[in-house]
Image (spheres, coloured by chain):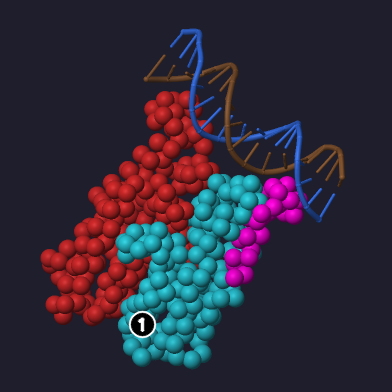
Chain colours: A cyan, B red, C blue, D brown
Amino acid sequence: MKEFAHYGYAGATVQGIADRAELPKPNIIYYFNNKQAVYDKVLLNILKLFQERLSPITAEDDPAQVLKTYIHSKVSLARDYPAACRIFASEIVHGGQNLSPNMKQAMRKWANRSTTVFQQWVDEGKMTPVDPTHLLFMIWGSSQFYADYETQVKTVINRKKISRAHYQQAAETICDIVLRGCGLNSG
Amino acid sequence: MKEFAHYGYAGATVQGIADRAELPKPNIIYYFNNKQAVYDKVLLNILKLFQERLSPITAEDDPAQVLKTYIHSKVSLARDYPAACRIFASEIVHGGQNLSPNMKQAMRKWANRSTTVFQQWVDEGKMTPVDPTHLLFMIWGSSQFYADYETQVKTVINRKKISRAHYQQAAETICDIVLRGCGLNSG
DNA sequence: GTCTATAATCAGATAGAC
DNA sequence: GTCTATCTGATTATAGAC
């Protein structure tokens, strides 16, 4: 993951992976058959990780709490697994050629479930009317930023590392603006 | 730009660039000296483009209008120059090794100017208190999303192309949520 | 299964004719 | 300046000893 996150698929070398794993290069090929298969496995693990770590967006409970929990889980993911987030980002940025139709289908379904919940909240008068899909993209984009654009974040805040306090502040600011922006001013 | 956007720096080939330019491969090397120099030039052009096309965030005028104009210019950039946006994204995702100290300095300065303006609005009671830096990141992340994650956007909305109406709707939703989130409910 | 040595390929860069 | 042919090095992948 580190090798692919740092150099991208094409730039990553089997030798680099082998060095990080402290194994001879042919062992990597022996275990995985080829470089593409290593990458496929890495991508699959990343999508599994995302499914495990992201709290679901469901119609139960109150909207404010569901969104808060989701945003915090998303920012925590960016903080704890930046390499995974960046590999995913790089894959999407370069066209998502290595995502299987199944993976795309899973994404679409998850997004549709979430936007359906948003729309339901709007219909029930719990939330200010906003486009559910673009709201979802806003939350994704804002939280992914702290992993994908970590370099730029560090440049702007002029620090060598993003501290836990920074991530906490980030999650709270996103929650704050999104909740107020959706008319969900609870606590 | 298309070659680098599609394959990343390492995956892009001089032959690929030559084919797109309908020129023999050695001409590219002759004009630019080497592949790295082509990429450096591309990056420089992208940063120039960003400076030209993004409306500045200044203390003049009313906050709502300044933010609206900025967000719309940012989404338009994502719509009109997706390749440029994605090369920049890929560069940052992979550590920004090719960004010169000058480029980083320019980014830092621009961000500081913007957050100073946000803070001024807060101090003047024009805006609900929010962390200025994270607000800036939110706007960046949300709007970049439509270029960087175009693949995912298309997967989720289940279309082959993001229409002009989609971009318009995206910009309006971001404006809507950000303005309300910052207590800037004008028109 | 594990590893050393090597083959095959591909891409960046150069030489040199025109 | 432009182009064909070629060199060099790096990288994936394999052969085959242990």
Q: Position of residue B53 (x, y in %)?
A: 26, 52
Side of A29 relative to A77 (left or right): right
Side of B25 relative to C8 (left or right): left
Q: Position of residue A67 (x, y in %)?
A: 44, 82
Please tell me whether the stretch drawn in magenta is mainly helix, strand or loop. Answer: helix
Q: Chain of mark 1?
A: A
Residue B146 makes an appearance in the image: no
Answer above or below: position of A174 versus B30: below
**Amino acid type of the residue that numbered disc 1 sits on in the rendered structure:** Leu
The residue beneath circle 1 is A179
Answer above or below: position of B12 versus A54: above
10 Å crowding of disc 1: few (<14), some (14-19), many (20+) = many
- Counting labels gives 1
Residues shaded magenta: A21-49
Measuring 32% from the left and 64% from the top, which residue is drawn there?
A157
Position of the N terminus of chain B, as image quadrant, is: top left
Of A130 and B118, nearer the camera is B118
Q: Position of residue B118 (x, y in %)?
A: 21, 70
Residue B122 makes an appearance in the image: yes
Q: Position of residue B92 (x, y in %)?
A: 42, 54
Measuring 49% from the left and 34% from the top, which residue is drawn there?
B14
Of A97 and B87, nearer the camera is B87
Of B112 and B90, nearer the camera is B112
Does the segment drawn in magenta span residue A41?
yes
Answer above or below: position of A121 versus C17: below
Position of the C terminus of chain B, as image quadrant, is: bottom left
Side of B64 relative to A103 (left or right): left
Measuring 50% from the left and 65% from the top, which residue is drawn there?
A82
> Which quarter of the picture shows residue B65?
bottom left
Does the segment drawn in magenta span residue A179?
no
Could you tell me which secondary element the residue under label 1 belongs to?
Answer: helix
